[in-house]
Image (cartoon, rainbow, N blue to C red):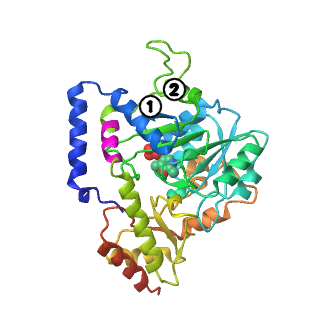
Amino acid sequence: MNDFKAEPEEIREAMLVAAKRVLDSGWFVLGKEVESFEHEWAAACGVAHGVGVGNGMDAIEIALRALDIGPGDEVITTSMTAFATVLAILRAGAIPVLADIEAATGLLCIDSVQRCISARTKAVVLVHLYGQVRNMDAWSALCNERNIVLIEDCAQAHLASWRGRMAGAFGRVGAYSFYPTKNLGAPGDGGMLVTQDEAIAKKSARLRNYGQSVRYHHPELGMNSRLDEIQAAMLSARLQWLEEFTQRRRKIADTYRIGIKQPLVTLLSAPQESAAHAYHLFVVTCEVREQLQAHLQSCGIQALIHYPIPVHHQEPCLDVARDPNGLVNTDRHANVCLSLPCHPQMSADDVALVIAAVNAFKCD
Ligand SMILES: *Cc1c(COP(=O)(O)O)cnc(C)c1O
């Protein structure tokens, strides 16, 4: 699913130069490298402010806390996501409410979200699952009409855009992760909030650092979720390749869409425009998913499941509130989804091998 060792040697060299610069500087946490990477990433997202934090989960928690969303407030999101999305809502002290997904994309279903809205609903955390950004006019309109804050979980959507606007630029806050396997990944943990709102950026910058305003002054209770200089410097080096790598992911996906002709396999809906998908994952569905996965494994192809156990089946979340109509599509998707390899280090031969293996699959 990933092959970091096959990355171009120039990336490794650029990362070593960046790491050496930090070691030589003698300054390791929240400094010039973080500041400059914050500017670079905010600019890449087309927003005014970026606040580097420890990881993607903290970016969501800090966003909620910066917006004063906490105990007694409901936040609607999806159960088909990394556990971190819902854990961040719980860590902020708010009440998660799980809406169902659309079968064709795996993304939050707007009708289900509407059924989940109550007088206590304060925010929707919209997850751009697998890298897809869709129907943002509808989400913005709903949130405006109902006076709900839109927060985007962009952990899988680096450089995905919709009608020329980048993921993270639609909501009050966009939350990014730079975990190693993400489309822009650090050799370690990292995350960032992006926002147009200066007050939210300032409050987030305090919250990530014990709630400190100026040194030794703590007007609020924050957390410790700072971005390291060495991660920021290396992320900034890796950012130079992100556009090229994202194009490569799109090319692989296009090749899959043309080449996969297997009656037992259904592809998710194509994006509304090419740029609206960053293809963090290329996901298909198959009623005999385990058999398909085993067949691919026997052809030397790793395929993984995102996600096999939705959040509402995780032990601490069995009682979490949800759409009164149930999470039918979520449960179904969890049983049939399979992620095919789709990363920038795949060669044309690798892609052809995956297509041939999928097309050769027969179920017993
Ligand atoms: C990875 C991920 C996160 C959490 O990011 P971390 O940096 O691992 O904390 C949150 N949401 C989604 C959708 C993710 O894929």
Rendered image quadrant of residue 100: bottom right
Q: Secondary structure at mark 1?
A: loop
Q: Residue furthest top?
A: 216
- Looking at the rendered structure, the kind of residue marked 2 is Leu
Res. 346 mark: none
Residue sitting nearer the eye, 23 or 180: 23
Please name the residue that numbered disc 1 is placed on: 225
Q: CA distance from mark 1 to mark 2?
A: 8 Å
Badge 1: few (under 14), some or many (20 or more) residues near its Cα, within 10 Å? many
Please name the residue that numbered disc 2 is placed on: 207
* Quarter of the rendering occupied by the N terminus: bottom left
Q: Residue at x 44, y 77 (%)?
A: 292
Q: Secondary structure at mark 2?
A: helix
Q: Residue at x 34, y 44 (%)?
A: 186
Q: Is residue 338 visible?
A: yes
The range drawn in magenta is 232-239
Q: Is residue 54 visible?
A: no
Q: Residue at x 46, y 52 (%)?
A: 159
Residue sitting nearer the eye, 18 or 320: 18
Query: Residue 137 location, x and y as percent?
Result: 67, 53
Proximity of marks 1 and 2: CB atoms separated by less than 8 Å: yes
**For residue 96: magenta?**
no
Query: Residue 326 location, x and y as percent?
Result: 71, 59
Q: Main secondary structure of the magenta part?
A: helix
- Looking at the rendered structure, the kind of residue marked 1 is Ser
